[in-house]
Amino acid sequence: MDTSNEHKRLDYICWRDYFMAIAFLAAKRSKDPVCQVGACIVNKENKIMGIGYNGMPNGCCDDFFPWGKNSPIPTETKALYVCHAEMNAILNKNSADVKDCTIFVGLFPCNECAKIIIQSGIREVVYLSDEKAHKPSYQASKRMFDAAGIKYWQYTPQTDKIVIDFKKLKLSESPSKAEIEKLTLNDV
Ligand SMILES: O=c1ccn([C@H]2C[C@H](O)[C@@H](COP(=O)(O)O)O2)c(=O)[nH]1
Ligand SMILES: [Zn+2]
């Protein structure tokens, strides 16, 4: 590795790792105790068009709506309320539409998200986990994507792990006032 600082860094992350990592960072915002999902929509110019994670709808307090799915009360189940990551990413878009875009998701989309993805004009789905592939609703997604000509494929990141260590980064924060004065005096 070149450590001279005279040439460009070579250990930067590639675009796909970057977008997938953003999807996972967004998932960190999820309050779901079991499954946190994030999604990042990107256009052909590698510009981010929308980000989302699974959460309760606006105005539906995270503390009062159910996060479980085993309650004897039929209405006390998260599935009735949670907005899925893909839907949130599409609705949060910062452009007129997401036509021809790619969506990066931590988890392969369910059938409800698949419908929304198709209708939004997204053409490609890049996912990391396919852990629910055995469930009919996820098989339905693949059936719909195949019929609609949406490309979908499981991503293998190039980087094993991406760490953001705020504590370590803080060590290189701007110098204190005393340090600045010392530096200035030494410069004169
Ligand atoms: O396409 C999907 C599928 C699921 N999710 C979210 C919805 C829920 O909050 C969890 C799934 O919880 P389980 O306990 O595993 O049923 O994942 C999503 O955002 N997008
Ligand atoms: Zn879904």
Image (cartoon, rainbow, N blue to C red):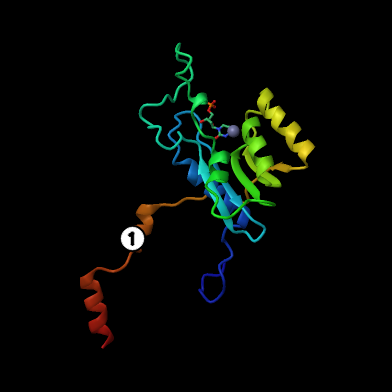
Q: Residues within 10 Å of mark 1 (few under 14, many from 20)?
A: few
Could you tell me residue 125's position as x and y percent? 67, 44
Residue type at mark 1 is Leu
Quadrant of the image containing the N terminus = bottom right
In terms of depth relative to the viewer, which is nearer, 35 or 162? 35
Task: Give the residue displayed 56% in from the left and 67% down from the top.
Answer: 9
Q: Secondary structure at mark 1?
A: helix
Left or right position of 77 against 166:
right
**Count of labels in the image:** 1
Could you tell me residue 114's position as x and y percent? 66, 36
Task: Give the residue displayed 36% in from the left and 26% down from the top.
Answer: 64
In terms of depth relative to the viewer, which is nearer, 115 or 166? 115
- Residue lying farthest top? 72
- Residue lying farthest front? 96
Left or right position of 6 against 102:
left
- Residue lying farthest bottom? 188
The answer to which quarter of the image holds residue 29 is top left
Q: Which residue is mark 1?
A: 171
Figure quarter occupied by ligand 1: top right
Q: Is residue 155 visible?
A: no
In terms of depth relative to the viewer, which is nearer, 77 or 129? 77
Task: Give the residue displayed 40% in from the left and 32% down from the top.
Answer: 60
Could you tell me residue 188's position as x and y percent? 26, 88
Q: Is residue 29 visible?
A: yes
Task: Give the residue displayed 74% in from the left and 34% down from the top.
Answer: 144
